[in-house]
Every structure is written in structure tokens, then in C-alpha cells.
Amino acid sequence: MRILVLLGLLVAPAALAAPPEIKLKDGPARDLVKASCSTCHSLDYIQMNSVFLDRKAWDASVTKMVKAFGAPVKPEDVPRIVDYLVQNYGKADAPPAATGK
């Protein structure tokens, strides 16, 4: 019995510890992104998806969050949010086509 109590005392602080805070990269509109996105989900969602999403996909994702899930984002803020996500967490877009010059 004493062993169980001792184990409980050792494990309890770790179980009660808060998860680490997700810090977004610094940049224009970071606070807007943090406030807008964290109302519905954890900010680690941004980091987890960043390896997959280019500008077109980030735009589609933000649009889906607003239109399908009702994210509280003003229409005029959507381009700023998408720009921030692309610049800081976007997969590189395909390079522009060569002009032959």
C-alpha cells in the first residue's frame, strides 16, 4: 500500500503539469492568427500541417474553417491570416516558370 501511495506522489505532479505552450513564429499578423485559430483548436495544428500546405491549401483550409466550421474571422482578416501562414508555415510553392530571357 505504501508503495502505491509513494508512486502516486511521484507521478501526480507530472500528470498535473500544463502542456507546453505552442509559440508561433514571429511575423505580421501572428497575434491575429493566434487569436483567430486558437478559439477552435490548438496551435500545434498549424505546425503539424505546415509541411503539407502551400498557399492554395492554406487558403482552402482557412476558408473551410470560416465557412464550414464557423470560425470567428472577419472576411478582411482572411488574406492576412493566409499570408502569415504561407510565409511562416507554408510549403514552398513551385518556382515560377522560366521566361527564357
Image (spheres, rainbow, N blue to C red):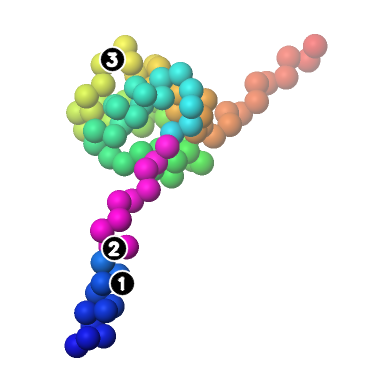
Disc 2 residue crowd, few under 14, some 14–19, many 20+, Cα 10 Å: few
The residue at which mark 3 appears reads as: 75
How far is disc 2 from disc 1 in space, using C-alphas?
A: 7 Å
In the image, the segment drawn in magenta is 13-23
- Give the spatial CA distance, label 2 vs label 3: 44 Å
Magenta stretch, main secondary structure class: loop
Q: Is residue 31 visible?
A: yes
Q: Do callouts 2 and 1 mark residues in contact (Cβ within 8 Å)? A: yes
* Residue 21 among magenta residues: yes
Q: Residue at x 23, y 82 (%)?
A: 4
* Foreground pick, 40 / 67: 40
Determine which quarter of the picture holds residue 76.
top left
Q: Which residue is mark 2?
A: 13
Q: For numbered disc 1, what is the local secondary structure?
A: helix
Q: Is residue 4 above or below residue 28?
A: below
* Residue 51 pos. (x, y %): 51, 41
x 46%, y 18%: residue? 28
